[in-house]
Image (cartoon, rainbow, N blue to C red):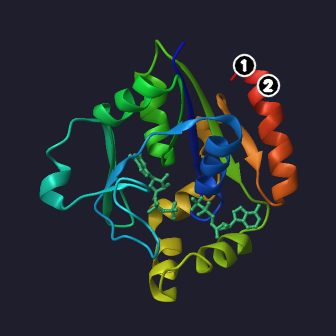
Amino acid sequence: MRKLLVLCGGSGAGKTTIQHYLEKKYSFSRVLTHTTRRKRRGEKNGIDYYFETKESFFQRQYLEYIQYDGNLYGSSVESLLNTWGKNDKAVIVLDTKGVLAYRQKLLTEKVIFWYVAVTDKEIFNKRILKRGEKEEIAQRRLRSKEAVRDMQMPQQLRSFCEIILNDNWEKTKEEIKLQLQQSGF
Ligand SMILES: Nc1nc2c(ncn2[C@@H]2O[C@H](COP(=O)(O)OP(=O)(O)O)[C@@H](O)[C@H]2O)c(=O)[nH]1
Ligand SMILES: Nc1ncnc2c1ncn2[C@@H]1O[C@H](COP(=O)(O)OP(=O)(O)O)[C@@H](O)[C@H]1O
């Protein structure tokens, strides 16, 4: 059966780190999404995202798309089906608005949702500055209304989204193992 794990959480909480770990340790395949934001240092087209222009972005068919800190992000039907074509176990990273869209749309597949949390908001600041962006861009990101919204789990997600606390990486790994066992992934 096709399975999808949806990760969301604040900017810098550790979604991408957890996604890579799920690939390496638990043989998930990542669903790449599309964005018009600029590449960060080290990011590659077709590896981290499909980097698009505004024109090319709208040439795809999306399950959903959103605006985040002034850029467009969208998950294409094609990318999800491609991933499932090679692996039943897929993982995607979305903002919390995208999570609600997936919750309503993907009714026939096995889908679970995780919100990646940190206890102290200062952690967002520290982590995001380590990430290869100019400080000014990182600070703007953290002040954007979408980033501020996603720093706490929105009320509407509480009934179906598991919280993965990512303060301490060793504990996060244990929590991931437990949650995967409990949900049969
Ligand atoms: N709804 C939705 N959100 C996306 C998609 N792709 C990425 N995102 C989210 O967009 C937000 C910004 O992503 P990114 O620029 O990589 O920044 P980061 O969260 O600071 O690492 C994050 O919350 C991602 O989870 C997508 O296709 N759909
Ligand atoms: N548990 C952790 N402890 C310390 N640093 C972490 C932890 N998890 C992630 N990081 C680091 O924090 C930064 C942001 O993580 P990332 O996964 O890119 O966040 P997100 O995708 O949620 O924006 C990266 O430099 C990453 O290596």
Marks 1/2: CA distance? 5 Å
Q: Residues within 10 Å of mark 1 (few under 14, many from 20)?
A: few
Q: Is residue 122 above or below residue 111?
A: below
Say which residue label 2 marks.
181
The kind of residue on which mark 2 rests is: Gln
Say which residue label 1 marks.
184
Residue 75, percent across and down? 35, 41
Q: Does any portion of residue 153 appear in the rendered image?
A: no
* Secondary structure of the residue carrying numbered label 1: loop
Query: From the Cβ of disc 1, is ligand 1 less than 8 Å away?
Result: no
The kind of residue on which mark 1 rests is: Gly
In the picture, the quarter occupied by the C terminus is top right
Q: Nearer the viewer, residue 170 or 114?
A: 170
Q: Nearer the viewer, residue 149 or 3?
A: 3
Q: Is 62 on the left-hand or right-hand side of 148?
A: left
In the picture, the quarter occupied by the N terminus is top right
Residue 111, percent across and down? 56, 24
Q: Is 141 on the left-hand or right-hand side of 123?
A: left
Q: Is 24 on the left-hand or right-hand side of 175?
A: left
Residue sitting at x 34%, y 49%: 66
Q: Is residue 24 above or below residue 181?
A: below
Residue 159, percent across and down? 66, 29
Residue 131, percent across and down? 57, 75
Q: Does any portion of residue 163 appear in the rendered image?
A: yes
Q: Quadrant of residue 80?
A: top left
Q: Are marks 1 and 2 in contact (CB under 8 Å)?
A: yes
Q: Nearer the viewer, residue 21 or 57?
A: 21
